[in-house]
Image (tube, rainbow, N blue to C red):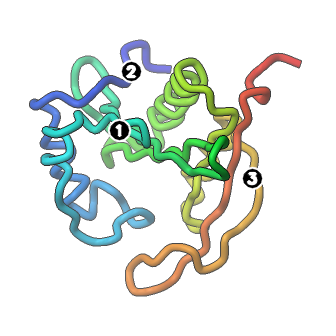
């Protein structure tokens, strides 16, 4: 466990990380890259990437951004929603436990500061490291959405994971 790893709102000096996410396939990795995107800097300038419908924070270790955690609202009805979380670590941070630690931080943050009862993660079925990591955080595999995500010219299966607020409480 890295003592100094935490998440915080993006600052102007962190925007190079957002540029990498939007414009460099090696940053997102083979399971998340869906093509070039734009607008992250504009959205940061407008909202700081924090809204009522979701957000993104920089994952920081010893003052340096090393990844991104994000969440977006998944509504089930007018009164009920879950947060669907996402995570992207820089390539050199992968398989070091940083992503798992950042995901734990985000789980605790969302349960402490929002009223949601459920968090979700949708992970490419081929992305075994992410699937293993999210299970270590406590998420439960709930099923497969076949052909749900388009990436690299083909429709891919997506694994559905869930974590309830009560799952974190000691038995």
Residue 32 versus residue 121: which sits nearer the camera?
121
Where residue 98 sits in the image (x, y, percent)?
A: 45, 32
Q: Are marks 3 and 2 in contact (CB under 8 Å)?
A: no
- The label shown at residue 56 is 1
Please tell me whether mark 3 or mark 2 is closer to you in this view: 3
- The label shown at residue 5 is 2
Local secondary structure at mark 3: strand
Residue occupying image coordinates x 44% and y 45%: 87
Q: Which residue is mark 3?
A: 141
Q: Dot 2: few (<14), some (14–19), or many (≥20) neighbours within 10 Å? A: some
- Measured in 3D between alpha carbons, the distance from the residue under mark 1 to the one under mark 2, in whole angstroms, is 16 Å
Residue 51 versus residue 125: which sits nearer the camera?
51
Residue occupying image coordinates x 13% and y 48%: 42
Asked whether, in this view, residue 89 is left or right of residue 135, the answer is left
Q: Quadrant of residue 150?
A: bottom left
Name above or below for residue 55 compared with residue 88. above
Local secondary structure at mark 1: strand
Local secondary structure at mark 2: loop
Q: Dot 1: few (<14), some (14–19), or many (≥20) neighbours within 10 Å? A: many
């Amino acid at each position: 466990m890295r003592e100094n790893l935490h998440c915080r709102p993006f600052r102007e000096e962190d925007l190079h990380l957002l540029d990498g996410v939007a414009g460099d396939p090696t940053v997102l990795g083979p399971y998340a890259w869906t093509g070039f995107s734009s607008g992250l800097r504009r959205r940061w300038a407008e909202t700081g990437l924090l809204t009522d419908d979701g957000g993104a924070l920089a994952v920081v270790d010893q003052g340096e951004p090393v990844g991104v955690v994000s969440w977006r609202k998944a509504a089930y009805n007018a009164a009920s929603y879950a947060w669907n979380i996402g995570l992207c670590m820089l390539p050199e941070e992968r398989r070091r436990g940083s992503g798992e630690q950042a995901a734990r931080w985000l789980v605790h943050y969302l349960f402490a500061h929002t009223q949601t009862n459920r968090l979700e993660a949708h992970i490419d079925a081929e992305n075994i490291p992410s699937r293993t990591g999210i299970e270590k955080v406590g998420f439960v595999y709930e099923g497969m959405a076949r052909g749900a995500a388009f990436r690299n010219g083909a429709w891919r299966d997506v694994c559905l994971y869930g974590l309830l607020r009560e799952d974190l409480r000691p038995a």
